[in-house]
């Protein structure tokens, strides 16, 4: 299996691993294919994502995509963060082997779940965000 240099870099030195104690939103999802779990924490201030962290029991591809996804959403507005899709994350990583594509879903799904959690806690509506399944 071939991994890009960027995937290897984010797997070997993952960014933003950990927990945000006073997170504005937390999202946890499970991967239907492998049963692995991903948790994303967001710190949101004035509609902007100030910090993002993740914890996963997932594989290397899940680690690399979450590392990249959390890097990409930091500093973005909520609407901009919704554009950080798993496709965008995979492009930023120069691709993933086809059998690992489902792992990349975890980052996007957990990110969306964390945004949903934030919206519920704060009574705001996020345009275009679907409830977590
Ligand atoms: Fe489970 Fe990749 S095999 S997240
Ligand atoms: Fe693979 Fe979402 S986890 S489709």
Image (cartoon, rainbow, N blue to C red):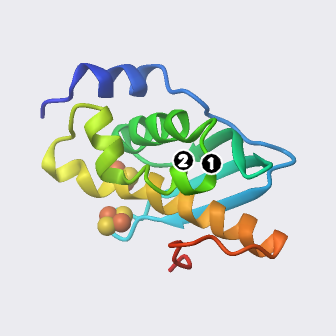
Judge from the rendering whether residue 26 lies leftward or rightward of residue 37; answer left or right.
Answer: right
What is the spatial separation of the Cα atoms under label 1 and label 2, in whole angstroms?
Answer: 24 Å
Task: Please tell me in which quarter of the rendered image ligand 2 is found.
Answer: bottom left
**What is the crowding at mark 1: few (fewer than 14 residues within 10 Å), some, or many (at least 20)?**
some
- Residue at coordinates 35% horizontally, 52% vertically from top-left? 86
* Quadrant in which the N terminus appears: top left
x then y, percent, for residue 118: 74, 64
Question: Does the Cβ of the disc 1 residue fall within 8 Å of ligand 2?
Answer: no
- Residue at coordinates 82% horizontally, 71% vertically from top-left? 121
Residue situated in front as seen by the camera: 118 or 106 = 118
Which numbered disc, 1 or 2, marks the residue closer to the eye? 1
Find residue 4 and name its label: none
* Secondary-structure class at tag 1: loop
Work out whether 27 lies above or below 128: above
Mark 1 or 2, nearer chain start: 2
* Secondary-structure class at tag 2: strand
Find residue 77 and name its label: 1
- Residue at coordinates 37% horizontally, 58% vertically from top-left? 105
x then y, percent, for residue 120: 76, 75
**What is the crowding at mark 2: few (fewer than 14 residues within 10 Å), some, or many (at least 20)?**
many
Q: Which residue is identified by label 2? A: 56
x then y, percent, for residue 44: 76, 49
> Where on the picture, by quarter, is residue 117?
bottom right
Question: Does the Cβ of the disc 2 residue fall within 8 Å of ligand 1?
Answer: yes
Judge from the rendering whether residue 49 lies leftward or rightward of residue 105; answer left or right.
Answer: right
x then y, percent, for residue 72: 49, 36
Quick check: marks 1 and 2 in contact, CB under 8 Å?
no
Judge from the rendering whether residue 103 lies leftward or rightward of residue 54; answer left or right.
Answer: left
- Residue at coordinates 29% horizontally, 42% vertically from top-left? 90
Q: Residue furthest right?
A: 22
């Amino acid at each position: 299996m071939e991994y890009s240099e960027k995937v290897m870099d984010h797997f070997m030195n993952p960014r933003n691993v950990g927990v945000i104690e006073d997170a504005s939103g937390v999202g946890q999802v499970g991967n239907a294919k492998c049963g692995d779990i991903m948790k994303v924490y967001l710190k949101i201030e004035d509609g902007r994502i100030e910090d993002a962290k993740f914890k996963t029991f997932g594989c290397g591809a899940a680690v690399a995509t979450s590392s990249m996804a959390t890097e990409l959403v930091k500093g973005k507005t909520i609407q901009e963060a919704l554009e950080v899709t798993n496709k965008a994350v995979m492009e930023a990583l120069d691709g993933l082997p086809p059998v690992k594509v489902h792992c990349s879903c975890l980052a996007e799904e957990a990110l969306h779940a964390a945004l949903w959690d934030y919206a519920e806690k704060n009574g705001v509506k996020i345009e275009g965000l679907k409830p977590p399944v």
